[in-house]
Image: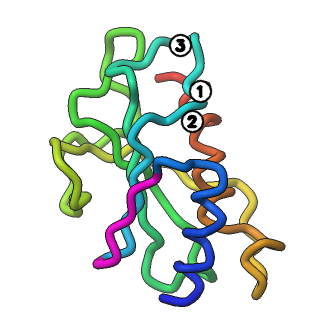
Amino acid sequence: MDERIENELEIIREYYSDIEYESEGHWFLIPEYPEMPDEPKWTPQPMPVAFYPRQGYPAQKPYGMFVPADILVDGDEPDNFKPNPNKQPPFDGEWGQLSWQPKEWNPAANVAEGANLLSFALTFKERFREGK
């Protein structure tokens, strides 16, 4: 999986130039997720988002996104949110986990041709648009 992740990191960096990567656990951090909708209103802003590929990736689709533990949507805690998950990103701050997974997941041997961690990160905007 390490070679695939390295290839995917290159692809992600083309889109999210400020991505941070922690090789232990293959954690990714987008310090300021750029596709936040105007409505509903999510706080804090800017919104950092962390994620990692689950065991069995890429056959096992990625799940969840890690966001600040004090996240609110229109002033309320979002649905399907764990403010203190067992697994924590290795980045500064207190993190919670929003449930999320891509609807479609068709990875290919060539990371640029099928579903990958960039395509996963790009779907986060769908979850943010859903709101609560």
Q: Residues within 10 Å of mark 1 (few under 14, many from 20)?
A: few
Residue at (70%, 54%) from the top-left corner?
A: 103
Residue toward you, 81 or 115: 115
Residue 79, position as x, y percentages in the image? 40, 31
CB of mark 2 within 8 Å of CB of mark 1?
Answer: yes
**In the image: residue 130, left or right of residue 76:** right
| Disc 3 element | loop
| Disc 2 element | helix
Residue toward you, 53 or 132: 53
| Type of amino acid at the residue the image marks with label 3 | Pro
Disc 3 versus disc 2: distance between alpha carbons?
11 Å
Residue wearing tag 2: 127
Residue 78, position as x, y percentages in the image? 38, 27
Residue 98, position as x, y percentages in the image? 40, 43
Numbered circle sitting on residue 130: 1
| Disc 1 element | helix
Residue 91, position as x, y percentages in the image? 22, 54
> First in sequence: mark 3 or mark 2?
3
Residue toward you, 81 or 49: 49
| Type of amino acid at the residue the image marks with label 2 | Arg
Residue wearing tag 3: 40
